[in-house]
Amino acid sequence: MTEEQIILLKQAGAETLRIPVADWMYAPYEPFIGCWDGALDELDRVLELCKTHGLTAVIDLHAIRRSQVLSVCSE
């Protein structure tokens, strides 16, 4: 998100920005080690922009370990 996008959201009447995150941003594990470097800094940057421009942010824990695995149920 850029500051300009945050400003446009606010001008359009938005009050809240939903930010999806994954648990591997906080404690990396395979296969995500290295591919999310800097993600927490980016999250902090966007949260500061929201604060500066009067938007509330909701951090959505969008994915956790094994949450994307399909389960097979027998009948």
Image (cartoon, helix red, strand yellow):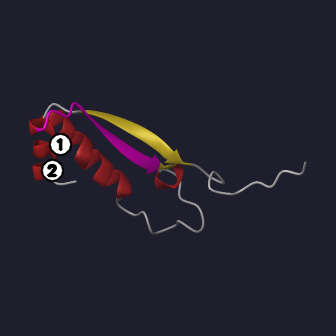
Dot placed on the residue nearer the N-terminal end, 1 or 2: 2
The range drawn in magenta is 12-21
Q: Residue at x 42, y 63 (%)?
A: 36
Question: Can you say which quadrant of the picture contains the N terminus?
Answer: bottom left
Amino acid on which the number 2 mark rests in the picture: Gln
Q: Which residue is mark 2?
A: 5
Q: Which residue is mark 1?
A: 49
Amino acid on which the number 1 mark rests in the picture: Leu
Image x and y of residue 41, in percent: 31, 53
Name the residue at the front extreme.
75
| Residue 6 located within the stretch drawn in magenta | no
Choose top left, top right, bottom left or bottom right for residue 37. Answer: bottom left
Q: Decide if residue 27 is on the left or right side of residue 7.
A: right
User: Mostly what secondary structure, the magenta segment?
Assistant: strand
Q: Between 19 and 9, which is closer to the camera in this rendering?
A: 9
- Of tags 1 and 2, the one toward the viewer is 2
Q: Decide if residue 74 is on the left or right side of residue 42.
A: right
Q: Residue at x 48, y 42 (%)?
A: 61
Q: Residue at x 11, y 45 (%)?
A: 8
Q: Decide if residue 52 is on the left or right side of residue 67.
A: left
Q: CA distance from mark 1 to mark 2?
A: 10 Å
Q: Decide if residue 69 is on the left or right side of residue 24.
A: right
Determine the secondary structure under disc 2. Answer: helix
